[in-house]
C-alpha cells in the first residue's frame, strides 16, 4: 500500500516537473519570438526591410502559427515590392481575426501593385461585404475599376492603330533617297545655270568683237572711195 502511494506521488512529481519544463520552454520561446519581432519592427521603422523580414522569418520558422509575424513579414515584403510573396504572408495572417481585415485590405493592395486588377477588385469587394463602412476599401475599389477601364481603352486604341510593315519602312528609305536626289539635282541645276551664264557672256563678247570688226571694215572701204 505504501509502495503504491509512493509510486503515485512520484508519478505526479514527474508529471509536474515535465509540465514545468514545458512551460519554461514555451515561455522562453515566446519571449524569444517577441524579441525577434521587436528587432524586426525597429529595422522596419528604419527602412531596413530585408533585416526586418529576416527577424520575422526567424519567428515563422519556429512558430508557423504566429500570425503577427506573418502580417509584419507581409508588410516588409510589400515595401520590398515583392507583392506576390506579400500576398502569401497576408493570407496566413488573415486566419487570425485580429489581423483578418487588415490582411485582406493589404492583400488587395498587393494585387493592385502587381497589376492583377481583377484579383484586387474581387478582394476589395469581399472586404466591403464584410465591413460596409470601410471607406478606404471602397475608394481603392473605385480606383481599381477606373484603372481597369483605362487599360481596356488603351488596349482598344492600340488595336486600331495600323502596324508599320517592313515595306513601309523601305518606302520611307526610298523617299529619303529621293529627297537626297532632289537635293543633288538642285546643285546640278545651279551648275548648269552658271555654265549657261558663262556661255552667254562669251557669246556677247564674240558678238561685240564681230561688230567692232565690221565697223573697222566699213571705215577702210570708205577711205578707198575717197581716193
Image (cartoon, rainbow, N blue to C red):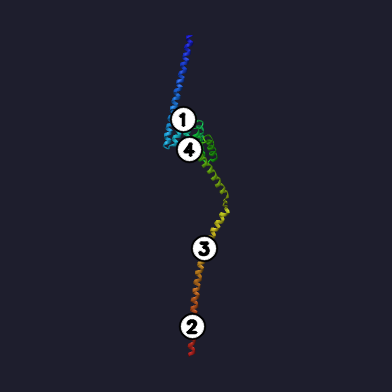
Give the labeled residue for mark 2.
Answer: 215
Q: Picture coordinates of residue 80 (x, y %)?
A: 47, 38
Q: Earlier in the sequence, mark 2 or mark 4?
A: 4
Give the secondary structure at mark 3: helix
Q: Which mark is residue 184?
A: 3
The residues bearing labels 1 and 3 have C-alpha atoms spaced at a distance of 79 Å
Residues at circles 4 and 1 in contact by the CB criterion of under 8 Å: no
The mark closer to the camera, 2 or 4, is 4
Label 4: few (<14), some (14–19) or many (≥20) C-alpha neighbours in 10 Å: many
Residues at circles 4 and 3 in contact by the CB criterion of under 8 Å: no
Give the secondary structure at mark 1: helix
Give the labeled residue for mark 1.
Answer: 59
Label 2: few (<14), some (14–19) or many (≥20) C-alpha neighbours in 10 Å: few
Label 1: few (<14), some (14–19) or many (≥20) C-alpha neighbours in 10 Å: many
Q: Nearer the viewer, residue 85 or 159?
A: 159
> Image height check: is 70 above or below 171?
above
Q: Picture coordinates of residue 12 (x, y %)?
A: 47, 16
Give the labeled residue for mark 4.
Answer: 78
Residues at circles 2 and 3 in contact by the CB criterion of under 8 Å: no
Amino acid at each position: 500500500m505504501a509502495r503504491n502511494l509512493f509510486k503515485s506521488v512520484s508519478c505526479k512529481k514527474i508529471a509536474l516537473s515535465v509540465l514545468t519544463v514545458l512551460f519554461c520552454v514555451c515561455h522562453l520561446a515566446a519571449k524569444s519570438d517577441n524579441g525577434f519581432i521587436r528587432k524586426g519592427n525597429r529595422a522596419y521603422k528604419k527602412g531596413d526591410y530585408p533585416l526586418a523580414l529576416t527577424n520575422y522569418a526567424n519567428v515563422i520558422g519556429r512558430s508557423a502559427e504566429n500570425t503577427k509575424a506573418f502580417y509584419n513579414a507581409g508588410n516588409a515584403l510589400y515595401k520590398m515590392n515583392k507583392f506576390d510573396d506579400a500576398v502569401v504572408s497576408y493570407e496566413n495572417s488573415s486566419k487570425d481575426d485580429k489581423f483578418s481585415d487588415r490582411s485582406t485590405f493589404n492583400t488587395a493592395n498587393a494585387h493592385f501593385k502587381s497589376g492583377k486588377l481583377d484579383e484586387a477588385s474581387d478582394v476589395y469587394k469581399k472586404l466591403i461585404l464584410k465591413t460596409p463602412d470601410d471607406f478606404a476599401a471602397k475608394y481603392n475599389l473605385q480606383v481599381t475599376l477606373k484603372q481597369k477601364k483605362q487599360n481596356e481603352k488603351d488596349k482598344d486604341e492600340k488595336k486600331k492603330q495600323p502596324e508599320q510593315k517592313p515595306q513601309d519602312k523601305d518606302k520611307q528609305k526610298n523617299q529619303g533617297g529621293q529627297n537626297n536626289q532632289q537635293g543633288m539635282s538642285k546643285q546640278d541645276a545651279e551648275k548648269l545655270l552658271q555654265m549657261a551664264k558663262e556661255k552667254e557672256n562669251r557669246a556677247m563678247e564674240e558678238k561685240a568683237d564681230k561688230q567692232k570688226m565690221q565697223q573697222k571694215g566699213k571705215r577702210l572701204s570708205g577711205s578707198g572711195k575717197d581716193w
